[in-house]
Image: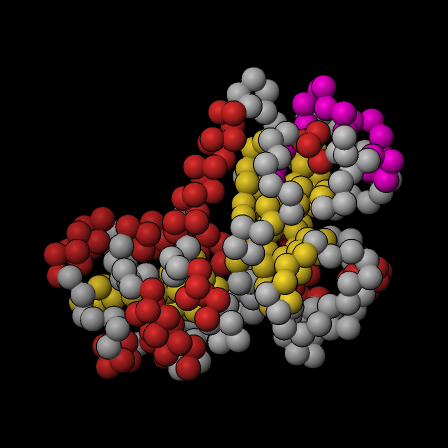
Amino acid sequence: GAAEEISRILRLPAAAGVDNFFNGRVELVEFRLGANSLLEGLPLSQFRERIGKGVLVCTAERAGNIQIPKGHYVLQAGDRISITGTPTDVYHFFHRIGILKKRIKNVMIVGGSRIATYLTQSLLSTGIQVRIVEENEKRCQEIKTLIPKVELIHGDGTQTDVLLEAGLEEMDAFVALTGSDEENIIVGMYAAFLGVAKVVVKVNEQHIIDMMEGSPLDSFIQPKNICSEQILQYVRAMQNASGSSMKTLYNLSNGQIEALGFQVLKDSKCIGRPLKDLPIKEEVLVASISRGKFSFIPDGNDEIKVGDHIVVITSEHGMHELDDILKE
């Protein structure tokens, strides 16, 4: 859920958002292209030659317009793009383009919600120190009983003096999880102003996120959207219970584009021909193939095989099985 997504973002702080497929074997990572990036001015037709084969650009958002870009698309500063690849390839990609940020060692969380406790347990298990600021004394006691190793500050985390006394300026990352979108935005902006390298804020309302375009904040978590995606996965599976091959689903860019995960069944029409010879719909991108222990970005000569796990990016909604990527 939300805690897992925040944990993934904090482990790859250069990213604005991180989703994964097939138990973490493939990652879908969103980030914003900064000024003077090695990618600025690069046509996607030259991406593999210049950057390597490990990752694939899946979506690009510019001035509010989202698309699955083709080879003629030229990357520009300010673009919000998503890439897919194995965790190792994604790590090396960020290293190559010079935006791999230092590993996060400590995190401050404001708001001791259930999401905060799940997140804390996940971070502590990876060796990251966590400090929670929570206003309710009873909740502080509950958290301390549940997670004895966490550092707890009893105080109002929306007050600057409390945050400073709690050591905000020393933190590598800050996560705002209060019950108010507005308060999360304000304290998140304050943390960014103080120079905290990575800031994640919980915001439920999309229009508030839209208003933050161009601000120092780029990582927003929408728990209700995550819950909706989980429900949608279940509903789709039930609709095709007699043999649906869909495994996972994520909405990108406020639901305009979907990232779908499929397992290839033996009766699929996609089997046995190179991708370049398949009548794949224009609005579909085959982003990744996982086969056995290996995952890779396919090219036109690769074939889909029985048992493969496939990540598909599409602007067409309502796909239930892999063969839906093909034209009639």
What residue appears at the point 52 percent right and 58 percent down from the top-left corner? 17
Q: Position of residue 130 (x, y in %)?
A: 34, 62
Q: Position of residue 284 (x, y in %)?
A: 71, 44
What residue appears at the point 44 percent right and 80 percent down from the top-left corner? 195
What residue appears at the point 76 percent right and 30 percent down from the top-left corner? 328
Instruction: Between residue 127 and residue 213, name the one nearer to us.
Output: 213
Q: Position of residue 88 (x, y in %)?
A: 64, 52
176 displayed left or right of 213 = left
Magenta part mainly helix, strand or loop? loop
Q: Quadrant of residue 290?
A: top right
Instruction: Between residue 49 and residue 103, name the one nearer to us.
Output: 49
Q: How is the image coloured?
A: secondary structure
265 displayed left or right of 163 = right
Queried whether the magenta region covers residue 262, the answer comes back as yes
What residue appears at the point 47 percent right and 37 percent down from the top-left corner? 232
Q: Position of residue 248 (x, y in %)?
A: 55, 37
- When the figure is inspected, residue 199 is found, relative to residue 36, above or below; the finding is above
- When the figure is inspected, residue 254 is found, relative to residue 77, above or below; the finding is above
Range shown magenta: 260-278
45 displayed left or right of 176 = right
Q: In this orientation, does residue 250 appear?
A: yes
Q: Quadrant of residue 46?
A: bottom right
Name the outermost residue toward the front: 328
71 displayed left or right of 240 = right
Queried whether the magenta region covers residue 275, the answer comes back as yes
Q: In this orientation, does residue 123 appear?
A: no
